[in-house]
Amino acid sequence: MHPSSFHTSRLGLTPLGIGDASFIQELVNTEGWLRYIGNRNIHSQAEAEAYIQRILEHPDIQYWVARPMPEECPAGIITFIKRDYLDHPDIGFAFLPAFSGHGYALEAASGVLDFLTCHHGLNQILATTLPENTRSIRLLEKLGLCFEKAIEVNGETLWVYEKRMDD
């Protein structure tokens, strides 16, 4: 499945592309990304382009870039990834600090879930987060995901949240 472009009421969501390298370089070096997602060691345009290229080449990974309209500057990403350690795809999100607290992540993630449900027959979604990431937990709950279980991945405890689309 390749991501398609679509809009919500305030956002344009487009597939991640090489042209988003400067944005990705900035995003993956924010305090929130480093603390809750991990250091990707991306410190140059070339490293960001290589990171994006790896994402684009992987069939189990889709990223959408969320851009508030009409400005069209990148604000954040919504990810949809089938991970080896999970039975179903996992949704994720990360936004630049300047765009946090405006409801963009909720709107973008809801839009992606609606898009995947309507166009790809998605019937179950998971999400993982660190137990201390209370902002992500609140957003997952607003999206209708419920805590399922704790798992260990690479020596780290992750909380798994789940939503069945037919509920």
Image (cartoon, helix red, strand yellow):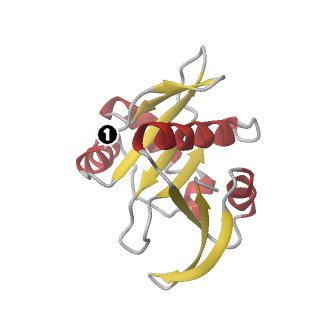
Residue at the (31%, 34%) spot, across then down: 18
Could you tell me which residue is drawn at 71 percent across and 41 percent down? 100
Task: Count how many numbered circles sit on residues in the image.
Answer: 1
- Local packing at callout 1 (Cα closer than 10 Å; few below 14, some 14-19, many 20+) is few
- Measured as percent of width and height from the top left, residue 20 is found at 40, 33
Which residue was labeled with disc 1? 2
The image shows residue 98 at horizontal and vertical percentages of 68, 36
Outermost residue, top side: 70
Q: Give 42 or 61, whichever is nearer the viewer.
A: 61
Q: Does 152 appear above or below 76?
A: below
Q: Secondary structure at mark 1?
A: loop
Residue 22: name its quadrant: top left
Residue 7 placement (x, y as % from top left): 54, 24
Rendered location of residue 126, percent (x, y) = 54, 62
**Along the line of sight, the residue nearer the viewer: 119 or 65:** 119
Q: Is residue 60 left or right of residue 135?
A: left
Left or right of 17: which side holds 96? Answer: right
- The disc labelled 1 sits on which kind of residue? His
